Amino acid sequence: MLEIHPKVGEVLRTLEENGHRAYAVGGCVRDIMMERHPTDWDVTTDARPERIQELFPDNFYDNAFGTVTVKTRDDDPIVRTIQITPFRIEGRYTDQRHPDEVTFAKTIEEDLSRRDFTVNAMAMSADGTLVDPYGGRDDLSAKIIRAVGDADTRITEDALRMMRAVRFATTLDFSIHDDTLRALTRHAALLERISAERIRDELTKILNAPRAMHGIQLLEDTGLLRFILPELREGVGVEQNLHHIYTVWEHNLRTMHYAAQKGYSFPVRMACLLHDVGKPRTKRGEGRHCTFYAHDAVGATMARKIMERLKYPGETVDAVVRLVRYHMFYYSVGEVTESSVRRLIANVGLEHIDDLLRLREGDRIGSGTPKAVPYKLRHLKYMIDKVSHDPISVKMLKVNGQDIMEVLGIPPGPKIGLILNTLLAEALDDPTINTRELLLKRAGELDAASAADLKSALERIEQARDSEEKERMKKYYV
Ligand code: ATP
Ligand code: MG
């Protein structure tokens, strides 16, 4: 087991030495018992807010929960601030969202009783003594998420706990205890009262976990998904054509699973999950030859609605919509021209192309095909690289023909081209000479050279172009 962070130990001891009880509590205790590094440290104590402020003068105070945030100014950012909250007990919940009142409690046990799950309801004092009245340690080793006390009561008090149960099961790789799972299934509809922002934050954590697919399946099995991503459920049981062995639902999930396994960014995962969300509404015909024309455009519109409803930031919305919109880009080696690749880059944006290819890889793997990056996709990557890099040409030089004519005082003619080519050939050998000053100086010397000498430059440039192309082909294995 990891230990209490020394800075947190210091805070706990300060409280103890001043006659108070104090504990690290909640997620941080759970995390250290699992050998994970906590993302933040919470402290709870029988000292009241005024007293905490007195003992830690460098603080700010949030009246609503009685939480005093102490500024330690430690070097370690995790403990630069530590939240100290007096033992609390919550009153009745009439809205399944917020307790009607927050009251201070006398004992740590009372405080732990208001917490959501047994593994989150443990406290630890500075000397490492564990307070665990609900069997959190046992549930931790059995990998179980179990509500503290009566599951129905705890879930109806605060419906967000349903999302939290699924989130912890997903991120910690735990299962949900039967009673708690039943309560989730029974009360799923209460999720309607929870704000989109709080649902969004939990959904994001679920998707960012390696086991995201399991999490989404759990949301579906409990009936919660209906209140989060109802559009995604339209794909359940929708069979596809001869190119697919999975239903639309399963294919969307498997595509996202690939992205989660690969550790791809949140927008890519979300886009993978939603990439075929437009298929059920565009399906025409049945059996091996059914079609889904325009499902990418319809899906993009749906994805925008979904992402906006969940209050994702505009940038994230755009990223997901863009990927869904263009995921069907056509590519066939030999058939697709450089200009169509340029058009794809113009539509999607060069900086988003890699994400689009990641989605496409997931799309393939999620269809049950063995290879993520076949020759075709490698060839596209090669083409994108090629058209997005300037070709080797005299335009790369810091001087042009006009400069040469002016400085050397010679008229337009083939000689200008020969000199520029020679400068380029030399700059390819030694890029440091590509400055206006050095090039012009060198141009003066070349002016005296014979045309035959200058002609060898073209060959050298061709060689450079050739080897650049060979490198690129090697890189993409095409
Ligand atoms: P993480 O920070 O890793 O997401 P956490 O368990 O620390 O997980 P927080 O949201 O930071 O979760 O909350 C800290 C603690 O507060 C929890 O461990 C739990 O004891 C309690 N808690 C948080 N939200 C709720 C809730 N909705 N109902 C009951 N207790 C809660
Ligand atoms: Mg936390």
Image (cartoon, grey):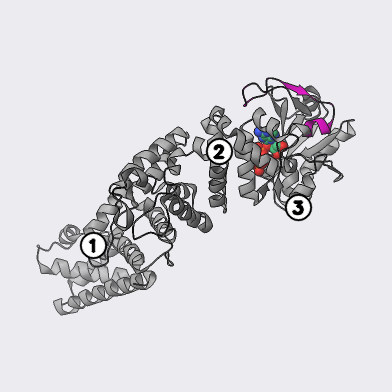
Q: Nearer the viewer, mark 2 or mark 3?
A: 3
Where residue 146 sits: x, y (%)?
71, 42
Q: Residues within 10 Å of mark 3 (few under 14, many from 20)?
A: few
Residue 141 circle label: 3
Disc 1 C-beta below 8 A from ligand 1: no
Q: Residues within 10 Å of mark 2 (few under 14, many from 20)?
A: some
Classify residue 386 by image quadrant: bottom left
Residue 426 circle label: none
Determine whether label 2 and label 3 are within 8 Å by CB: no
Between 233 and 81, the one lying in front of the other is 233
Local secondary structure at mark 1 = loop
Local secondary structure at mark 2 = helix
Q: Is residue 94 magenta?
A: no
Q: Quadrant of the C terminus?
A: bottom left
Where does label 1 land, which residue? 336
Left or right: where 183 falls relative to 148 = left
Classify residue 164 by image quadrant: top right
Where does label 2 land, which residue? 201
Mark 1 to mark 2 CA distance (whole Å):
41 Å
Q: How many marks?
A: 3
Determine whether label 1 and label 3 are within 8 Å by CB: no
At horizontal 74% and vertical 49% (from top left) the residue drawn is: 140
Where residue 97 sits: x, y (%)?
62, 26
